[in-house]
Amino acid sequence: MNSFSLDRLAADGTVSARVSAPRGQIADDRAMLRAAAELTRDLIAPRPAIYWADLLASVVIGYAALAGAILIEPLDWAIVSWLVSVLALYRAASFIHEVSHMKHAALPGFRLAWNALVGVPLMAPSFTYEGVHNLHHAKTRYGTIEDPEYLPLAHMKPWSVPLFVMVSALAPIGFLVRYALLTPLTILVPSLRRPVEARFSALCINPEFRRRPTEGEAMRRWWQLEIATSIWATGLIAATATGVLPVKALVILLATISGMMAINQVRTLVAHLWENEGEEMSVTAQYLDSVNVPPPATLPVLWAPVGLRYHALHHLLPGLPYHSLGEAHRRLSAALDGNSPYHKASYAGLPGLLTRLVRGTFRAR
């Protein structure tokens, strides 16, 4: 069992002596949790203008750059345009995380617009994350076998890290199979529907996760989005097969999705420390197993967009909109003393975190 050094909490919630405790046994830091709740009450409301402007700008830049990658003749400029499209559409796609958390009455039409502009065209509609990601935040599920977004990567074999990324790069092929083949099959062969829903309808990293049935309005929305994505995926294949869509265009689109998924998978590698081995964890333990990469680091704007650079803080305050996380971090950093566990979840950047993870896999051998 792993050990983790943490300051012991006194009865009043202050920090006293240091102790070493298994990660699953780290007690909640009441002072940190109280400060997080009290100092951010005015930051909870989403600001629609920011959401819409950010999404629409990312979509316009992303698709314009994608068109450039397809149409521009000089290879070097086409590659530059493709890279811009990957980063911009990756940012647009990252709003699926916000869609899975937001109260939709506060941002009417945003989920529909996101799916129409991003989810369906990139073959990752929001139903693949809604009803799944919230399980990752459940106190009794995080880091356990029932968490769809957790694996003890720090204790796995060294080859698991590159394999983790390489598999994600094949995602667009999987998306085509899922929607152009499996969706029609489940309509023709209803007995296949349940296995497909359970095993091939969630954006997750835990291969043991099985999705439970969805009902009511969520199920109706799922079907609408799945049918729309199926029509789109089938149309892409048919248009390419008949020569209406150039093969080059389809290849570049799939390469763009592949690039986005690979970047996101690298980000996922450093979103947590991945050191838990199935134990239930307190909120503080979950926070300390998660990662913030705050300023002055600048590159997280590209590889951890839409608030994902504050992933640990997000686990502390999952209802906070992405545009409020930076201000929340500044307030908590200033209010909590240097001994607070809050400061222990901040890291300098991607290289150090990847190095830590890889070293952990070699120690686990």
Image: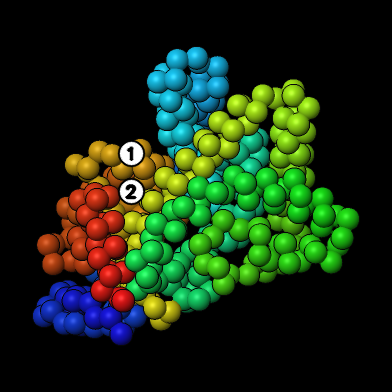
Q: Which residue corresponds to mark 2?
A: 309
Residue 174 falls left or right of residue 242: left
Kindly identify the residue that appears in the image at 25 percent across and 38 percent down: 298
CA neighbours of label 1 inside 10 A, class few (<14), some (14 to 19), many (20+): some
> In the rendered structure, which disc, 1 or 2, sits on the residue that comes first in sequence?
1
> Is 71 above or below relative to 237?
above
Kindly identify the residue that appears in the image at 51 percent across and 62 percent down: 205
> Which element type, helix, strand or loop, lies under badge 1?
helix
Camera-side residue: 328 or 157? 157
- Amino acid type at circle 2 is Arg
How is the protein colored in the picture? rainbow
Q: Residue furthest top?
A: 73
Pinpoint residue 362: horizontal percent, then vertical percent.
28, 70
CA neighbours of label 2 inside 10 A, class few (<14), some (14 to 19), many (20+): many
Badge count: 2
Pinpoint residue 306: horizontal percent, then vertical percent.
41, 42
Kindly identify the residue that appears in the image at 40 percent across and 24 percent down: 80
Quadrant showing the C terminus: bottom left
Quadrant showing the N terminus: bottom left
Q: Distance between the Cα atoms at labels 1 and 2? A: 8 Å
Residue 165 falls left or right of residue 64: left
Rendered image quadrant of residue 199: bottom right
Rendered image quadrant of residue 79: top left
> Is 131 above or below relative to 66?
below
Q: Are marks 1 and 2 in contact (CB under 8 Å)?
A: yes
Residue 34 showing in the rendered view: no
Kindly identify the residue that appears in the image at 61 percent across and 26 percent down: 249
Q: Which residue corresponds to mark 1?
A: 301
Camera-side residue: 218 or 195? 195
Pinpoint residue 148: horizontal percent, then vertical percent.
53, 66
> Which element type, helix, strand or loop, lies under badge 2?
loop
